[in-house]
Image (cartoon, helix red, strand yellow):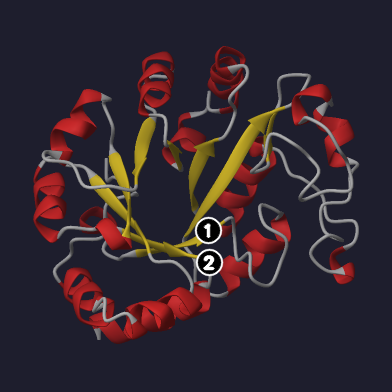
Amino acid sequence: MPNPFLAADVGFIRLCGHRGHNLTAPENTFAAFRAAHELGATSLEIDTVLSADNQIVVLHDLLLDRTTNGNGAAREMSAADIAALDAGSWFDPSFAGTRVPTLVDTIALAHELDLVLEVEIKEKVNLEAYYEALSHVLANPADRERVMMISFDHASLKAVKARIPGLRTGGIVHEHFPDPVAVARMSDLDELCIDLDVFDPADAAALHAAGISIRCHAYKPRTWEMARRAGLGWDDTLPAWLKAGLIDTLSGDDVGWLRDYLAKAVG
């Protein structure tokens, strides 16, 4: 079966909206997810934590304060109570009434829009309950096929993959390693999620040879402008890496900008 996270299998490089298109809509909400899709995203990076009733909700922080009108820990409220909060007004009054979705609802949206999901585990308090909840959410193989579970905590990814047969996992890395393939193999990873500033083409080639997909996070246009002024040379290196097929998914905050950049890079 083709791997939907490998460009060589699907025939194109995926564009991934970081928390959806979070520049024009509140992060990790359906509004941001639909906006990303409309701009050309075929993938979404989302964040998840556990509610008091052991439901997985799409939220970056363990606390509700930053992105809703609630306060305190998400784990102290039921998923229904979290869904009743306003998750849009903090971003702009026009998004008043926007809700925090569940992972189940987001997977349903992914089917509707033909998206894949990079689902980051942000839960820190009750990982065992999170794994158990995830095993129920992903009981359907068709749902599991659209999902890559990701984390900075590679040990947790190894644990959850052992728990759920057929699950794909991706380790987030912000540094170079002497042997990135060994890093991936150590935790039984299917993908490495690599920031652009530590991307190495030789490492990417080795990872692909080992069957490991690569998501490269490419930041915001403002960051690019600062990089240009600093002489980092990304405008030369990234197009070459894309043309060489070294990147399977290009992610960032401005999906429209990424779409235009990718189109220009690969011609």
Q: Are marks 2 and 1 in contact (CB under 8 Å)?
A: yes
User: Where is the C terminus found, in terms of image quarters?
Assistant: bottom left
User: x, y percentage for residue 260?
Assistant: 41, 83
Residue in the image at 82% along x and 59% along y: 88
Q: Is residue 199 left or right of residue 124?
A: left
The secondary structure type at the circle numbered 1 is strand
Residue at the spot x=60%, y=66% of the render? Answer: 21
Amino acid, disc 2: Asp
x and y, in percent, of residue 156 in the image: 43, 22
Q: What number is the disc on residue 253?
A: 2
Q: The N terminus appears in which quarter of the rendering?
A: top left
- Tell me if mark 2 has few (under 14), some (14-19) or many (20+) residues whose alpha carbon lies within 10 angstroms of its own: many
Which residue type does callout 1 highlight? Answer: His
What residue did someone put label 1 on? 18
Cα gap from disc 2 to disc 1, whole angstroms: 5 Å
- At label 1, counting other C-alpha atoms closer than 10 Å, the crowd grade (few under 14, some 14-19, many 20 or more) is many
User: Helix, strand, or loop for circle 2?
Assistant: loop
Q: Quadrant of residue 34?
A: bottom right
At 83% across and 48% down in the image, what residue appears?
68
Residue 153 appears at what percent x and percent y?
Answer: 41, 29
Question: With 156 as the anchor, is 54 left or right in this view?
Answer: right
